[in-house]
Image (spheres, rainbow, N blue to C red):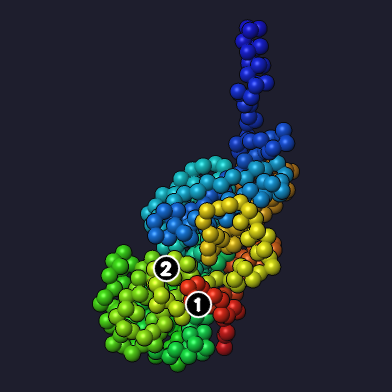
Amino acid sequence: MRQRLLALTAALAAGALTLTACGSRDEGNNGDGGSATTVTIGLDAPLTGDLAALGLGMKNSVDLAVKTANKEKYVEGVTFKIEASDDQAQPASGQQNATAFVGKEDVLGVVGPLNSSVGEAMQKVFNDANMALISPANTNPALTQGLDWQKEQKRPFASYFRTATTDAIQGPFAAQYIYNEAKLSKAFIIDDKKTYGAGLAATFKAEYEKLGGKVVGTDHVDPESKDFAAVATKVKSSGADVVYYGGEYPAGGPLSKQIKDAGAKVAFAGGDALYSPEYVKLAGKGSAGDFATSVGAPLEELESAKKFISNYEAEGYKEAYEAYGGYSYDAAWAIIEAVKSVVEKNDGKLPEDARKQVVEALQGISFDGVTGQVSFDEFGDTTNKQLTVYQVKDGAYAPVKSGTLTTG
């Protein structure tokens, strides 16, 4: 017996064995010799496939938030970690990822997804588990305000939040710029029939016609096809001076190129899912003059984003933070703030119903984030309603106007 005790003591001294305390959460080392509760923040996004550039920017930004919180020991007694899952921009995969996250006790909140259709598939899973889901990119209004949001706004899921503004604002904002300032009065509107694309195109169309713009044609495309010859011919013969596309850059770039190659003299415009260097690559030289709106103000112009940009570069991430990096960081930090609030109200520990309390805490948080003031309204929507119009100039998107939707 004495020999066994000596062997155990030697193993512990050498670090070969680790003793962990029992509790509702896993315990880990906080870097100063003490123990810390481990809280995992999930990340769901397309990490492979055509939209991976956006998804990887989201992942890196959440990773940076976690590293920053740990370095600053922002929540006493808590060490954060990230667990990333690839949804491949597919609702079924997102739903499976949601179920997996819910099954892991140390996951207290998830950042994502990118696609509104994926968010739609994930919401109920998280809500049933009283676990927070915060999207930095979903813009379809129905996700927070219900399917009949244009008639009656009613929040369907209390655990769902977002740091990106909605297409109820983005579509009309684009219409106002294109009609009033770009002076493009004849639009051909196309969408990809997805939750995001169809919804965005519909809100653009309603405001554009309200302003006096003429819709000279509408159509739908299969984004997986990449052969858009038929719709390109329709656009050319329609007399349109602008094409508005509700969809994402993997199809938007080739669609724009084929329309221009067919001889149509049009500007191509769309929402935040076109706002990526990848769109410019896919659309080619003919993309000069094209427009895209995106959530918030340009990060590079925000004083609040300077530290984020500097730290992101210092970490040496291989991928750019892209359109949703700042919003992903803020979404992760919102979860961190909520965890801090819950821990402080529970004598420095996580309660058994931590997930539920994190959701409740999120509703009341307010802090200065990368993208500006971060807080949520009664629907779980961001209170930051600012948007920016970008135009392709010299082979890259450049901001041409930032602001909010004009009403009345």
| Residue 353 seen in this snapshot | no
Q: Out of 370 and 236, give the one closest to the viewer.
A: 236
Residue 101 placement (x, y as % from top left):
49, 46
Q: Which residue is drawn at 60% across and 79% down?
A: 403
Mark 1 is surrounded, within 10 Å at the Cα level, by few (under 14), some (14 to 19) or many (20 or more) other residues, namely: some
Q: Which residue is drawn at 51% across and 73% down?
A: 397
> Is residue 345 toward the left or the right of residue 160 in the image?
right
In this view, which residue lies farthest toward the left?
230
Q: What element carries label 2?
A: helix
Label ID, residue 281: 2
Residue 214 placement (x, y as % from top left):
39, 90
Q: Out of 75 and 277, give the one closest to the viewer.
A: 277
Mark 2 is surrounded, within 10 Å at the Cα level, by few (under 14), some (14 to 19) or many (20 or more) other residues, namely: some
| Residue 200 seen in this snapshot | yes
> Is residue 102 toward the left or the right of residue 33 in the image?
left
| Mark closest to the chain's N terminus, 2 or 1 | 2
Q: Residue at x 33, y 90 (%)?
A: 239
